[in-house]
Amino acid sequence: MPARNRILEIKRTLDGREKRFDCTVLDRADGHLTVLFVSAVPMNVHGVALPVGTVTFGHFWTDRPYNVYHWLDASSGQTLGVYLNVADRTEIAADVLSWRDLVVDVLVSPAGALTVLDEDELPADLAPALRDAIVAALGTIRATWPALAVELEQARAALWPTLAVERGSGAAADPDAAGTATGPGRGPRPGASGP
């Protein structure tokens, strides 16, 4: 199987900080990009256990007020959880993916329960228009979650078999080959403590 393309992900925060990550491109369509991460360290994100080797499909859209980390069991490909970052300014170019993290996140359990996280971390002086955009994004997530869950499962079903082929050849089993970065908040891609 030919080598997958790489892309630089640039995550910007409300306070102007930037984090950069070298990613592996799994799929690219007009206005949508799916990237791969494989966890080199175990993590626990708000009660969701993500063991070493957790596979993350990161979905980014230019026309949606969020991006998604779909956490998958490395052996079975079954969903461990879904993490949505409320976001804006998502741009996808040939070799760069950039987006702005708007602090608030939504954790979805394998049973489908949605939990809003980090609202208490919003700056007190946040512009009213941006606060309204975050509230609207949360409303969109709640209203569209059933359809998004189906969309994520369809993507998982299409992409997982391609990874199995690579795992058989050793490509995805090697964290560096799979686009893994380590450090606080990296790996399974929790938004609250990292990217």
Image (tube, helix red, strand yellow):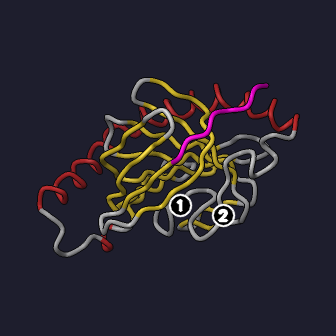
Report the magenta residues as a range: 1-8
In the image, farthest residue toward the right: 169
Element at badge 2?
loop
Q: Nearer the viewer, mark 2 or mark 1?
A: 2
Nearer to me, 75 or 191: 191
Say few, some or many: other residues with alpha carbon within 10 Å of mark 2 (under 14 / 14 to 19 / 20 or more).
some
The rendered magenta stretch, by its main secondary structure, is classed as: loop
On screen, residue 147 versus residue 188, left or right, reads left
Considering the image in quadrants, where does the N terminus appear? Answer: top right
Residue 121, given in percent of the width and then of the height, sits at 32, 73
- Relative to 62, does residue 188 appear above or below in the rendering? below
- Relative to 40, does residue 99 appear above or below in the rendering? above
- Residue that badge 2 annotates: 182
Nearer to me, 44 or 89: 89
- Residue that badge 1 annotates: 190
Residue 136, given in percent of the width and then of the height, sits at 22, 48
Reading the chain from its start, which is encountered first: label 2 or label 1?
2
How many numbered discs sit on the rendered protein?
2
> Disc 2 to disc 1, how far (Cα)?
12 Å
| Residue at image coords 81%, 29% | 165
Element at badge 1?
loop
Residue 3, given in percent of the width and then of the height, sits at 73, 31
| Residue at image coords 24%, 73% | 123
| Residue at image coords 50%, 69% | 193
Q: Amino acid at mark 2?
A: Thr
Q: Which of the 4 quarters of the picture holds residue 12?
A: bottom left
Label annotation for residue 2 = none
Nearer to me, 48 or 132: 132
188 in the magenta segment: no
Q: Amino acid at mark 1?
A: Pro
